[in-house]
Amino acid sequence: MIEKQDHTKLVTILPGAILGPYMDGKRSSTDHIFEMLLKGTPSPHVIYPVGDVRDPADLHILATKNDAADGKRFIAESEEMTMPQMARILKEAYPDRKVNTMVIPDFVVSIMAKFQVPMKVLNTMIGLKYHRDNTKARRLLGWKPRTAKETVLDTTQYLIDHHIV
């Protein structure tokens, strides 16, 4: 459809797991991850393709300003991070919280998934590997995503500041 006309351009931006401070004050499914971690729930070994909620917005703006983006597809993900890695970052940054860095074995997650909705979601993520490459967005558009660590810390601070956790 885009190729058949000349007045509309198309750029596709594919985000990973969107984390970060909210814009409209509504909770998202991903903040339950942080709630679990900050309340001491051990982590399953799942991988998140971390994308800060602010980064796809930045990438959209860069794409609108650069004609070279027309017709291209960009990955809006900074890096992969496991839930146990998130727990270790939070344990260090928030020593007064009950963050548990123990890793839950996969078979225990599958049992817990029968009784707990968050574990049901996490169970579907066990064994998934992403390995997406954001090089094109960095090189062509000069995009500079936030690090996964920065995103994890900013998300957590937002949740604490707004009395969500």
Image: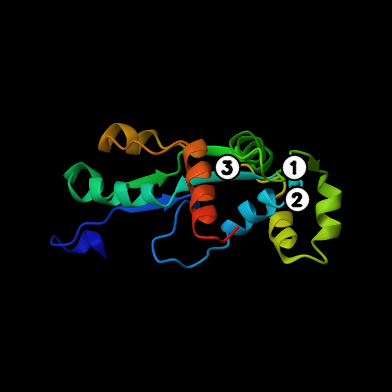
N-term-proximal mark, 3 vs 2: 2
159 above or below 81?
below
Residue 4, how many percent across, how many down? 20, 63
SS for dot 3: loop
Q: Name the quadrant containing residue 31.
A: bottom right
Looking at numbered disc 2 in the image, what kind of residue is underneath it?
A: Thr
Q: In the shown orientation, is residue 111 left or right of residue 8?
A: right
Residue at the location (36% across, 45% down)? Answer: 74
Alpha carbon distance from label 1 to label 3: 25 Å
Disc number lying in front (1 or 3): 1
Residue at the location (47% across, 38% down)? Answer: 150
91 above or below 39?
above
Disc number lying in front (3 or 2): 2
Residue 112 in view (yes/no): yes
The residue that mark 2 highlights is 41
The residue that mark 1 highlights is 100
Packing grade of label 2 (10 A; few <14, some 14-19, many >=20) is some
Q: In the shown orientation, is residue 47 left or right of residue 63?
A: right
N-term-proximal mark, 2 vs 1: 2
Contact? badges 1 and 3 (CB < 8 Å)? no
- Nearer to the camera, 74 or 99: 99
Alpha carbon distance from label 2 to label 1: 6 Å
Residue at the location (72% across, 48% down)? Answer: 126
159 above or below 144?
below
